[in-house]
Image: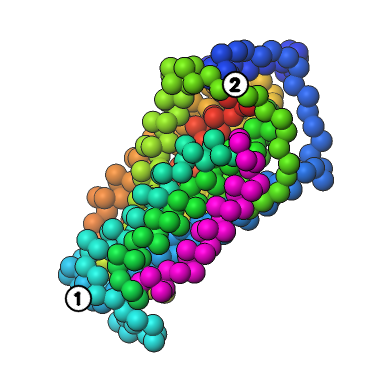
Amino acid sequence: MEQTSASDSETEDHVQPLLGRKNSGEIQKAPACCSSRYGLALLSCYGFFVAYALRVNLSVAMVDMVKNSSRPNSSSSICPRHSSPVPKHNHTARVYDWNSETQGWILSSFFYGYILTQVPGGYLARKYGTKWLLGIGILCTVIFTLLTPLAADLGAGYLIAVRVLEGIGEGVSYPAMHAMWALWAPPLERSRLLTLSYAERFLFLLQLSPTTDYIPWASIFKSLPLWAIVVAHFSYNWTFYTLLTLLPTYMNDVLGFSIQQNGMLSALPYIGCWCVTLLGGQLADFLRERYLIRTVIVRKAFTIAGMMGPAIFLVAAGFTNCNYFLAIAFLTISSSLGGISASGFNINHLDIAPS
């Protein structure tokens, strides 16, 4: 671990391998009070909260949307239930006869569309502007979410198609937001601003600054840091979105929690993740501002901690049997520790290619 004293000159080398250059220079601190960038971060926070609510609401609703006979072992959960049975469908909405395989296709279909617009989203943001791309993407997500009940009544295939289109719309949000922060986030505030922005997982605002026309594609595809970020994203997101999609079903079918308990307990891991994400961003920028640790070391350390910790507790949760307290505690700790990585690979794009 490399350290530099606080008395050293406030300069740091910024390596940008995707652009094939290395910048050195004094880092100017910008005032934070009443600044537009923190206003943007708060708007982003609220916008991603809405986007994620639109994304995951079906995962919780699915528990009460399907007939008991559609589930294996539907007469009882694997573990003893926690309270006197309550009517499963105490509402007048339609209940669907979808088996577990169909439910899996419905819940995962969003991500088939989501992955399609990740790379094009960055290009479109650069070409047409981030605020328009974000606005159109979120608008499409809202429209297709409103069509979800109608699609479900028409059939599972229609619902899958709507969820794919919803994913296509929301898939541009992160690339567009990253393109915006490349222009608005000072180097020593990136961890703080981006973790605040993504803590609730934005909608609109701001004008773009001029950008370079040249894109070094050869350097991009030969960049080891880029591929390291890709692998880190895939590894973390695999676990994160699996839990995000299937945790309510696990709470109901395995641990035997009612629909009322399910909603509250399924939220605990993400409350913890939200808190750790915000604290991690503050800590990462504190370490960098005081030059206790170089940026590259901070990113690597936070990524490793945010990967290994969740993996250990997620595996441990599989050995808790019907110990409800331990199962929920391990899942909560696992997701919470994952928030550390938000100050690692999740921000590293701006470090290696800030323009």
Quarter-of-image position of residue 29: top right
Q: Is residue 269 left or right of residue 242?
A: right
- Answer with mark 2 or mark 1, whichever residue precedes in sequence: 1
- Quarter of the rendering occupied by the C terminus: top right
Instruction: Give residue 243's position: percent from left, percent from top.
Output: 37, 52
Q: In the figure, 214 relative to 178: above or below?
A: above
Query: Disc 2 marks which residue?
Result: 214
Magenta stretch encompasses residue 141: yes
Q: In the figure, 95 relative to 103: above or below?
A: below
Label 2 element class? loop
Residue 45 appears in the figure = no
> Residue sitting at 22 percent across and 61 percent down?
101
Query: Disc 1 marks which residue?
Result: 69
Q: CA distance from mark 2 to mark 1?
A: 58 Å
Q: In the figure, 263 relative to 237: above or below?
A: below
Q: Which mark is residue 77?
A: none
Which residue is nearer to you in this view: 182 or 129?
Answer: 129
Instruction: Give residue 319's position: percent from left, percent from top.
Output: 24, 50
> Residue sitting at 27 percent across and 53 percent down?
320
Q: Amino acid at mark 2?
A: Tyr
> Residue sitting at 47 percent across and 17 percent down?
218
Label 1 element class? helix
Categorize mark 2 by other alpha carbons within 10 Å: few (<14), some (14-19), many (20+).
few
How many numbered circles are shown?
2
Q: Amino acid at mark 1?
A: Ser
Instruction: Give residue 255's position: percent from left, percent from top.
Output: 29, 64
Which residue is nearer to you in this view: 244 or 284?
Answer: 244
Q: Is residue 320 left or right of residue 336?
A: left
Q: Which residues are magenta?
A: 126-152
